[in-house]
Image (cartoon, rainbow, N blue to C red):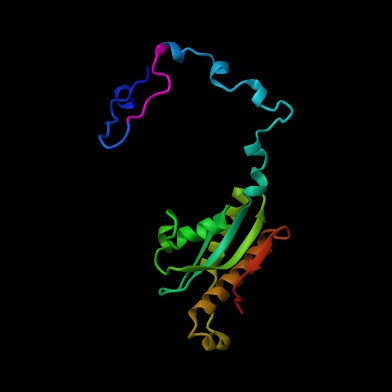
Amino acid sequence: MARLLSRTFKSLKPHSNSRPTHLPFANPTEKSRKPSQILPPSSSINPSSSESPSISGSSSRNSWAVYLILSTNSPIKTYVGVTNNFSRRLKQHNGEVRGGAKASRAGRPWICACLIKGFQDKSKAYEFESKWKSFSRKLPRKRSSKNLENADNPQILLLQHRYASLNQVKDVIDCSHLEIDWRLDPM
């Protein structure tokens, strides 16, 4: 016999418009079952493989990337982030899917300016992102004659600034194993 969750956990309130949720072990005798009685028979588990299928393929599926996106509406700005699924993340920034950074709400829609793939793990990607942002903040925005020609196009100026700071990151971190793909020409 199943019990309502709201009876077991008093803080939960039953909803009148939804079906009640039942606990799987409502009967005290069912709680005492051994795990082998709850799990599927061992014949369905492959004893020759030491890893489960979901874990074995995760390293190739979830490679980490650092990305640079550029806003196409006012205010024109750039955003640097880390993800293991860039297409989903870009949709989040553009408001098509729930999630995304609060800082990227203004300036939608966003387009990909640069995608850097090949990070060994999440921490290496976050380290790279942090360095790129840090160098971008510290790098002065120079006013040269070439920049004055592009003054009517603030997107180019922002991309040039991020490009210069990325070159400084390359001097500090070994990027030989990374694939840097500029989708918009910063020059």
Q: Provide residue 7's location: percent of width, then percent of height.
A: 30, 22
Of 186 and 175, the residue lying toward us: 186
Whether residue 128 is visible here, answered yes or no, is no
Task: Tell me the quadrant of the picture where the N terminus can be found.
Answer: top left
Residue 50 vertical position relative to residue 187 in the rendered view, above or below: above
Residue 122 vertical position relative to residue 54 in the rendered view, above or below: below
Whether residue 6 is visible here, answered yes or no, is yes
Describe residue 5's horizontal placement relative to residue 24 as left or right.
Answer: left
Q: Image quadrant of residue 2?
A: top left
Residue at the (28%, 25%) spot, across then down: 10
Taking the magenta stretch, the answer to whether it contains residue 101 is: no
Describe residue 187's horizontal placement relative to residue 30 as left or right.
Answer: right
Residue 15 vertical position relative to residue 121 in the rendered view, above or below: above
Q: Provide residue 25's location: percent of width, then percent of height.
A: 42, 19
Q: Provide residue 74's location: percent of width, then percent of height.
A: 41, 75
Q: Which stretch is magenta?
A: 20-28
Residue at the (48%, 60%) spot, across then down: 91
Of 162 and 116, the residue lying toward us: 116
Residue at the (46%, 73%) spot, across then down: 72
Task: Tell me the quadrant of the picture where the C terminus can be found.
Answer: bottom right
